[in-house]
Amino acid sequence: MTASPPRLRFAPSPTGFLHVGGARTALFNWLLARRTGGKFLLRVEDTDKARSTDDSTRAIFEGLEWLGLDWDEEVVFQGANLDRHRADAAKLLASGKAYRCFCTADEIAQRRAAAESAGGAFTYDRRCDKLDAAEIDRRVAAGSPFVLRFRVPDGETAWHDLVHERISFPNKDIDDFVILRSDATPIYNHAVVSDDIAMGITLVMRGDDHISNTPKQILLYEALGATLPQFAHLPMIHGTDGKKLSKRHGATAVGDYQHLGILAPAMVNFLALMGWSPGGDFEEVMTLDQLIHAFSSDGLLRKASVFDTKKLEWMNGQHLAKMPIAELESLVAPRFEKAGLATVAELAARRDWFHHLLEQLRVRSRLIDEIVAQAAPYFAESVTYDPEAVAKQWKDPAATLTLLTAVREALEAHAGWDPLLLEEMMRALAESKGVGAGKLLQPLRIALVGVSASPGIFDVMLILGRDRTIARIAAAERRLREMVAGA
RNA sequence: GGCCCCAUCGUCUAUCGGUUAGGACGACACCCUUUCAAGGUGUAGAGACGGGUUCGAUUCCCGUUGGGGCUACCA
């Protein structure tokens, strides 16, 4: 390992939201930087002016912030380094490592098409490298446009990848690639190398779709006389069809998952386990801190993985159940307000009550919106009875009416509101009526929340409070009387 | 087509030549139980194929097949 602290970077191009694959790459770089006491830098590769947008840049920052991936030092905007990119290209031209190519884009496209239709692969034939000096001078003087091409030397380019061990490419398979366009703007590989050198990057960790770029970049480092960084190529994340993750697979932006009700720590936890494993037996549900401590490039995997939203949701449920309740409150309260259940201030005013409600609902939820969705009966004035639940639990309206009336009267006659005593009371009542506890409690549940699934009935009563509980039973009685009359 | 990468249950993975190939998600069953969850227990479920190397291969090597990536004056 290097003596000085490692410097890693995440270098997205701002052509869209932060993709889960990009997020995973950012996370691994961040994790390793935090683990090793290195720096995690951010560089926005905005040299493709046609596709780059400020909205995308903002979306990427927001995505990283949401995940909690903070970066060190100033964000580098690649477009701001144009002068250096040109200077580095000029250096290569001056040292004879690159040459001017006067072939136009159209000519190249034609030759490529011809080669392909002939069944062969197109490689640039270096015709412009064979031009004599006088001819080059003449064309330059005449103002003929040209690109700068890198002259790929003979031999082989290989490196020791942190993920893949040794990877090598015969140089004959690498075309003399363009480094500077005819408008004197840099091509990706050149800009990346120029910037990575300038930023002092010591480890380039990125998706393995960049493997074939790596030999070109290594050649550039060498031609520029720079020290090589280490490379680590992470496996792709695929959709359920085994193809590269895309919009076809539903949500691919981390922001989509945020809005779906996924927790940032769960997302991070899940992403961390795609393409990395601590090895041996390990607990899969981990906090950010635990991830930092466990993370190591030794555990990097080679195989592409499939993004399994089912497991993500399970993991979210795990984090949901374990996170500090106060944290959950601040996360979920605004959503209650948005759903029109209660304002954030109202919830804060009866915080103990709200926390109790959250404790009851979070165990039953995988996404945070599911908490909100289940909460309606505890805020609404009255409940709406689910027809299916009514059909099943209030099958015999007359008998149910008798039962619920007895329940109401028992509750009214009793001043206390302790769940244990309530349970004792209800069980005794059921026994005196000659029915099982379930036969009493299920109809009661419909009366209280309108649906057949809810927290434990005595918790429900506690959350509702004495008055509302009794009022709801009375309302259910009225409804049952109508049903009896109607029948 | 060319080059490169990859290959253990449906999915995520453990295994550093010798294991009844383990765990997690999902599925199913059961337990718990006032419902739904959560939790607990259990069941089904994998080394792509063919050659080597070795006393012994999931593990090392080669090939085949399959999948993926790249193949721009995009990034």
Image (cartoon, coloured by chain):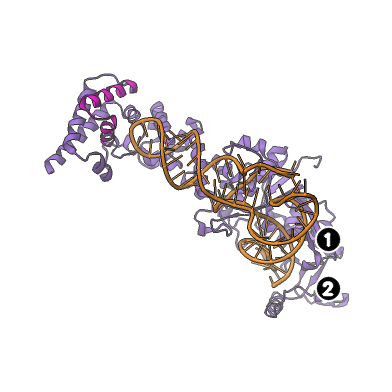
Disc 1 crowd, CA 10 A, few/some/many (<14, 14-19, 20+): some
The answer to whether A231 appears left or right of B21 in the picture is right
Quadrant where the N terminus of chain A sits is top right
Q: Which chain is purple?
A: A
Residue tagged by mark 2? A129
Q: Nearer the viewer, mark 1 or mark 2?
A: 2
**x and y percentages locating residue A47 in the rendered image:** 67, 59
Q: Is residue A19 above or below residue A115?
A: above
**Residue at x-position 72% and y-position 74%:** A121
The answer to whether A166 appears left or right of A457 in the picture is right
Q: Is the magenta stretch mostly helix, strand or loop?
A: helix
**Residue at x-position 85% and y-position 76%:** A130
Q: In this view, does B11 lie above or below A376?
A: below
**Is residue A135 at least partly visible in the picture?**
yes
Q: Do labels 1 and 2 share a chain?
A: yes
Q: Earlier in the sequence, mark 1 or mark 2?
A: 1
**Residue at x-position 25% and y-position 45%:** A387
Q: Which chain carries label 1?
A: A
Nearer to us in this view, A100 or A84? A100
The answer to whether A446 appears left or right of A322 in the picture is left
Amino acid type, callout 2: Asp
Q: Which chain is orange?
A: B
Residue tagged by mark 1? A91
